[in-house]
Amino acid sequence: MEEKQLKILLQSASRFQPGKKKFLYGTAGFRGEASMLESTVFKAGIMAALRSLKTGLVVGLMITASHNPVSDNGVKIADPSGGMMTQDWEPFADALALAPDPDHLVELIVQFAKKENIPFGGTQSAEILLGRDTRPSGEALLEAAKKGIDAIIGSVAVDMGILTTPQLHWMVRRRNMEMKASEFDYFALLSTSYRSLVDLIPAKTLTGTSDVKLTVDAANGVGGEKIKELSKLLTRLEIEVRNSGKEGEGALNEKVGADYVQKEKFAPLGFGPHDAGTRLWIRYLNASYMMTFEKCASLDGDADRLVYFRVLPTDGRSVDLVDGDKILSLFALFIKEQLTILNKENENESSEFPVKLGIVQTAYANGASTEYLKQLGLDVVFTPTGVKYLHEKALENDIGIYFEANGHGTILFSEAFMPRLESKSAELSSVTPGSEQQKAVLRLLAVSTLINQAVGDALSGLLLVEAILQYLGWSIERWSELYRDLPSRQLKVSVTDRNAVVTTNAETTVVKPLGLQELINYEMAKYPKGRSFIRPSGTEDVIRVYAEASTQEGADRLAQAVAQHVDCFLGMIPPVKQ
Ligand code: G16
């Protein structure tokens, strides 16, 4: 590394002295209290520049803390593929974050650059796309990231402005595929793909001529304004946005958003009987109120999670939750049906078209969803929590569908499969134009452009859900009845050191502390269909506890008992409901 480069690195690093709190590159990057993050974000800027320099491709850097409270923030790096930063670089990210002073930091960079053969000072340049969500701390942290990027000679930071996390990932992927990658292009592609799917719905299934209605809880985050923009381009779908982040609508992620709705199973603020409008409130519990919140969707703060729900008339607060598992099941059902149509024998039969379709879930998947997917004849595999693990596994298929119960997920069409699908489409359009087989291929092609291929995306997921519900002629109730969820409960336990818990078998078995798994097994055996596991959160300083059983009471008691064991081993304060 040249003298000039070393000097610049040392000079910039000395302006970002490490804070007291140490961060590690967790489930989705560095995350924590915003005021403590500046030097870590600066280092993430250096990392992103090195990654781009090494690959010779565009890389992304997003400032967001997703579902965390507004006082937190975070940073994550998008790899050239548009996916999460390669896991091979995570130890380096941790080492940089933990470097005690500028000298150590520079020393680490020099060693790593040598090991990775990063071409410093050559002709190779680096380009990093920057995005941030609406958090007030975002602007200053973005500046820190820019300083990190500027510290690597030949790097250019391109500020893409306020974006959802999936938009930034999408842009990185498209830039590296030499395709149009502006926000306008994103909205245009999503709306035209949605339109193509709706146009392929058999006329007999289309319900009336009026628009389909949906009320969206945008968690007072970045998704609010984005979905409003997107909805201007849509036909046959009328979206009303609540908790859009406008002044006076409430705080980011506070009793709103996908994480709240999925974990609490309560309607977000703005969706209770008082919020349905005065006239409707007076007529609370009658049909008008019910219609207002009949079909709702909830995004998280950076719009990479999506869940659906409808507010139940019983108390105007509880919801019938349609979580990531049911979104996955709906997508799987639809894709499988298209593949069946495609391979159906008829007089114009063309050659068979084998497709490897695979499903990826985590231990959080409700047992009933896995059973349903298996009954559909699908292969289901499990990975630890975190999109980066699920995504990697899903890529092993021609079409891989992955979802976490919390609403993170997408459908991946492999690079090898896309040309096959396109040539099948060309073949059918000349041999059997207008046939059911040709329509099935066109639907699959539309799904591949609608659904984000880089990462889970609430906006594109929502449009796919809406198109499929219209295709099937289903209400949200019908969809929810696909299978009955086993009752479940999630708790979190505050601990002094969450890294004291080590798990294996896709997080279903505790390896450390010794003896804890035996106690969990003992508790599980007490309840019919009892299942429970614990894992350290990658985004908060807690141990998460999940339990399910044949009754809600059983699931609650099991979760409580396991949480108490965790607390005895490691805890500081009593467990709280998530
Ligand atoms: C992030 C990851 C998700 C993961 C979640 C879990 O979500 O991107 O894949 O499910 O963390 O969080 P924890 O480790 O705390 O349970 P997000 O939406 O916060 O970016």
Image (cartoon, rainbow, N blue to C red):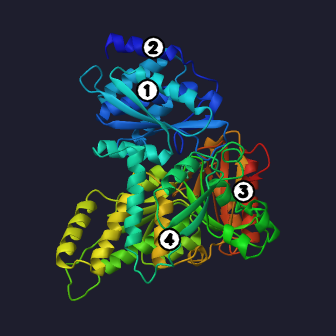
In the displayed structure, 108 sits above or below 312; it is above
Q: Which residue is mark 2?
A: 10
Q: Which mark is residue 270?
A: 3
Disc 1 crowd rating (10 Å Cα; few below 14, some 14-19, many 20+) is many
Which residue does the numbered mark 1 point to in the structure image? 46
Give above or below for 218 relative to 280.
Answer: above
Q: Position of residue 29 (x, y in %)?
A: 52, 39
Q: Depth check: 490 or 11 in front?
A: 11
Q: CA distance from mark 3 to mark 1?
A: 41 Å
Spatial separation of the CA atoms under disc 4 and disc 2? 52 Å
Residue type of the residue flagged with mark 4? Ser
Query: Assess mark 1: CB under 8 A from ligand 1?
Result: no
In contact (CB < 8 Å): disc 4 and disc 2: no
Circles 4 and 1: CB distance less than 8 Å? Answer: no
Query: Mark 4 vs ligand 1: CB under 8 Å?
Result: no
Read off the residue under disc 4: 329
Marked residue nearer the N-terminal end (4 or 2): 2
124 sits left or right of 35 in the view: left
